[in-house]
Image (cartoon, rainbow, N blue to C red):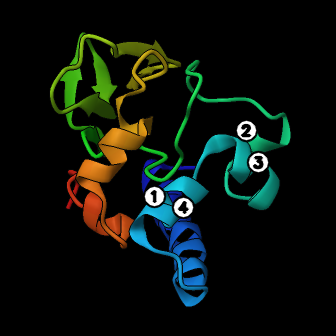
């Protein structure tokens, strides 16, 4: 699955959940709390492929899944540049010291597994928008 395919599919799943919660009268704070990993595994098992295991994408005690991706993540399925003869398909906008770029197959991708910044409730509060696509609008650099 390409980054763009995931991005669109995930954003639609996210929107459906948020719309349902708003329809039930959830406030911003309750919506953010709802996206706690432990609750999502039970309440929204189809939201993430890792929920079936259940396995966290980042080794942190309190993981919030509202963003599920980082607003600082950048991708271009056709490759944003060539480095050492390999296409770079994704990178971190701020070059976080917690992330790294790795060669997967013949393509360089950003590996964010050691960066949990967007999964803290504090970060989500600061960057919150009802529409996930608004928060993530700068991620797809191919447009």
Q: Estimate how packed mark 4 is, as few (under 14), some (14 to 19) or many (20 or more) residues with alpha carbons within 10 Å.
A: some
Q: Secondary structure at mark 2?
A: helix
22 to 32, vertically: above or below: below
Q: Are marks 1 and 4 in contact (CB under 8 Å)?
A: yes
Q: Earlier in the sequence, mark 1 or mark 3?
A: 1
Q: CA distance from mark 4 to mark 3?
A: 16 Å
As rendered, which of 50 and 81 lies closer to the eye? 50
Q: Residue at x 53, y 67 (%)?
A: 14
Q: Is residue 97 visible?
A: yes
Q: Estimate how packed mark 3 is, as few (under 14), some (14 to 19) or many (20 or more) residues with alpha carbons within 10 Å.
A: many
Q: CA distance from mark 2 to mark 4?
A: 14 Å
Q: Earlier in the sequence, mark 4 or mark 3?
A: 4
| Quarter assignment of residue 13 | bottom right
Label ID, residue 41: 3
In the picture, which quadrant includes the C terminus? bottom left
Q: Secondary structure at mark 1?
A: helix
Q: Residue at x 55, y 24 (%)?
A: 58
Question: Mark 2 = which residue?
Answer: 50
Q: Secondary structure at mark 3?
A: helix
Q: Is residue 52 left or right of residue 131?
A: right
Q: CA distance from mark 1 to mark 2?
A: 16 Å
Q: Is residue 78 left or right of residue 67?
A: left
Q: Are marks 2 and 4 in contact (CB under 8 Å)?
A: no
Q: Are marks 1 and 2 in contact (CB under 8 Å)?
A: no
Label ID, residue 40: none
């Amino acid at each position: 699955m390409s980054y763009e395919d995931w991005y669109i599919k995930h954003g639609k799943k996210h929107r459906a959940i948020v719309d349902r919660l708003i329809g039930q009268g959830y406030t911003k704070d309750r919506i953010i709390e709802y996206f706690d990993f432990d609750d999502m595994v039970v309440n929204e098992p189809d939201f993430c492929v890792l929920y079936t295991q259940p396995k966290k994408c980042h080794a942190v005690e309190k993981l919030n899944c509202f963003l599920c991706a980082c607003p600082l993540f950048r991708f271009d399925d056709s490759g944003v540049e060539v480095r050492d003869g390999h296409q770079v398909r994704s990178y971190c906008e701020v070059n976080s010291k917690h992330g790294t770029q790795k060669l997967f197959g013949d393509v360089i991708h950003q590996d964010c597994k050691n960066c949990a910044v967007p999964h803290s409730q504090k970060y989500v509060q600061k960057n919150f928008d009802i529409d996930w696509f608004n928060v993530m609008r700068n991620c797809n650099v191919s447009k």
